[in-house]
Image (cartoon, rainbow, N blue to C red):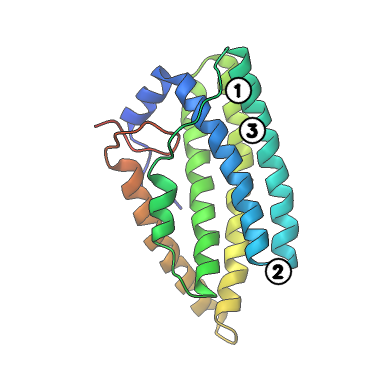
Amino acid sequence: MLAAATPVAWLETAVQRQDELLLDHANCEKKAASTALALMFAYPEDRVLSSRLARLAREELRHFEQVDKVLQQRAVAPQRMAPGRYAAELRRALRNHEPQRKLDLMLVGALIEARSCERFELLAPLLPQALGTFYADLALSERRHEGLYLQLAQTAAVEAQPGEQPEVVADQLQQRLQALAQIEAELITRPDTQFRFHSGPPP
């Protein structure tokens, strides 16, 4: 799904700045839960979406608690961090009209989860054993979340084009996913002045 791999320079920075990585990771888990809740409010008529995202939000909050426990073990104080460019710039690519906006939201959700999974997998063998094992386990969860958002995107694509042939819907869905994936890839490969879990490499 991803159009580019995480740059080696970002991984090297992450290994050197583990406390900052964990602080922003904790923020990401809270954001993931709040995004799921926001989508439930945005589309209350979609019972399947609400049910599945309610479970996802609970899981993301459990992950936040686990990351916060690691921070406490490391004696890292919680702190406010300015948001990076990643999520905001992805949201600028969303279409503004429905039902296309709903489809884009699901696809962007899938891409973010896919990127998180990839970074957890890449970081796991580079970090101290306990943290590496934790990240390897989280990668499995992120892969499931990616699949969930993709399933919701497929449903949204059908809803957006009622009566259209399934192969046409599938092709258009893939084209839109590829377009958004190109934007996502540019964000994580372009040099970034901030270090965040979803930032680009250092300048």
Give coordinates of residue 182: x percent, y percent.
35, 55
Q: Residue at the spot x=57%, y=64% of the render?
A: 153
- Left or right: residue 92 compared with residue 32: left
Give coordinates of residue 100: x percent, y percent.
50, 73
- Left or right: residue 80 compared with residue 5: right
Observer-nearest of 9 and 68: 68
Dot 2: few (<14), some (14–19), or many (≥20) neighbours within 10 Å?
few
The part of the image, by quadrant, that contains residue 28 is top right
Identify the amino acid type marked 2.
Answer: Asp
Q: Residue at the spot x=69%, y=48% of the render?
A: 56
Above-or-below relation of 109 to 166: above
Identify the amino acid type marked 1.
Answer: Thr
Task: Say which element carries label 1.
Answer: helix
Q: Residue at the spot x=61%, y=27% of the render?
A: 67
Give coordinates of residue 141: x percent, y percent.
64, 40
Give coordinates of residue 96: x percent, y percent.
45, 70
Question: Which one is earlier in the sequence, the residue at label 1 or at label 3?
Answer: 3
Q: Nearer the viewer, mark 1 or mark 2?
A: 2
Dot 1: few (<14), some (14–19), or many (≥20) neighbours within 10 Å?
some
Question: Which one is earlier in the sequence, the residue at label 1 or at label 2?
Answer: 2
Dot 3: few (<14), some (14–19), or many (≥20) neighbours within 10 Å?
many
Q: CA distance from mark 2 to mark 3?
A: 27 Å
Q: CA distance from mark 1 to mark 2?
A: 36 Å
Identify the amino acid type marked 3.
Answer: Phe
Mark 2 sits on what residue?
46
Q: CA distance from mark 1 to mark 3?
A: 16 Å
Mark 1 sits on what residue?
133
Mark 3 sits on what residue?
64
Whether residue 2 is visible here, answered yes or no, is: no
